[in-house]
Amino acid sequence: MNALSLVMPYYRNPGMLAEQYRVWSAYPEDLRAAIEVVLVDDGSPVGRRAIEVPRPADLPPLRIYQVTVDLPWHQHGARNLGASEAIGPWLLLTDMDHVVPAASLQDLLARLPGAGRRDVFTFHRVDAPHLHPTRDAHGQLKPHVNTFAVHRAHYWAVGGYDEDCVGYGTDGFFRTRLLAASTRHHLATVPIVRYPREVIPDASTSEPGVDPRQLRNAGRRAAETARRLAAKRARGAMAPTVLAFPWERVL
């Protein structure tokens, strides 16, 4: 059985997916055998779907799922679907514009046999092409909030992402719940590589004008999430909403 499932949402990123395929196919054979990839296409239109991107022969085991409706900024649901369908006991969740180098994956896999179910691993982040550490506007190191390794049972014990938290930038709701229930291990010497759009134009869908579905105004996003969570509390339903959408396996 694969020790680790790499779970990654996709939305209209054929160029970036082609780069992921190039990296995965270059993994050593023993590394490809130790992992699987679960790719969730979050409602991409015909012509830009993940299933339409040519695949090299020497990939790790790969499954592709398609969300069959185009929901606004639905990454939370895509991650829940990937975590639900994953086979490996451990999940490595990241975004399409983040590449996991072979050495980083090997380092993580070496740690997992001694890890407890409540352990969560986060990573250092560098930017392609020069691999300089990612920093925020104040010059501080900026690891990716949405990249972490977690035991699959623990992911669901925490409840998964709440699909009622809508809009780009609401990922922190799940991260806060997860880290509060976990022992975090930050791997400061284990990098994940972020690809900016200057390197691959469709690497990310996070900016206004790139993903036409997202709520672009942060205040509107926060207000919409607050409204949905208040409605849940009023119904007495505080558990996260998960897998509340139609989907199918396409590979």
Image (cartoon, grey):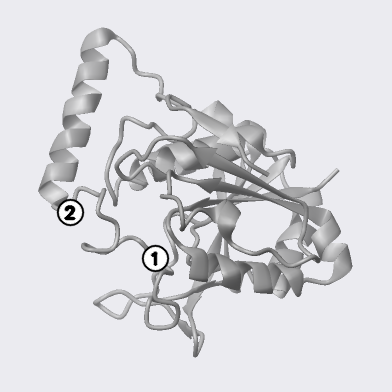
Q: Secondary structure at mark 2?
A: loop
Which residue type does callout 2 highlight? Arg
Q: Single out the residue that lies furthest toward the bottom.
A: 130
Residue 124: x percent and y percent?
Answer: 52, 70
What count of labels does the image hold? 2
Mark 2 Cα shell of 10 Å, populated few (<14), some (14-19), many (≥20): some
Q: Residue at x 80, y 66 (%)?
A: 58
The residue beneath circle 1 is 204
Residue that protrudes farthest toward the top in the picture: 235
Above/below status of 157 relative to 71:
above
> Alpha-carbon neighbours of circle 1 within 10 Å: few (<14), some, or many (≥20)?
many
User: Left of 25 or right of it: where is 220?
Assistant: left
* In the image: residue 72, left or right of residue 24: left
Image coordinates for residue 10, horizontal then vertical, percent: 49, 53
User: In the rendered structure, which amino acid carries the disc numbered 1?
Assistant: Ser
Image quarter for residue 173? top left
Seen in the picture, residue 101 relative to 95 is either above or below; the reply is: below
Marked residue nearer the N-terminal end (1 or 2):
1
> In the picture provided, is 169 more to the left or to the right than 12?
left
Residue that lies at the very extreme toward the front in this rendered image: 47
Give the quarter of the figure containing the C terminus.
top right
- Residue 120 at x, y percent in the picture: 59, 48
Secondary structure state at the residue bearing disc 1? loop
Viewer-closest of 15 and 152: 15
> Foreground: 111 or 88?
88
Residue at 73% x, 67% y is 56
Give residue 235's quadrant in the image: top left
How far, Cα to Cα, is label 1 from label 2?
A: 15 Å
Q: Is residue 225 among the parts visible in the rendering?
A: yes
Do the residues under discs 1 and 2 have CB atoms within 8 angstroms? no
Residue receiving disc 2: 216
| Residue occupying image coordinates x 46% and y 58% | 48
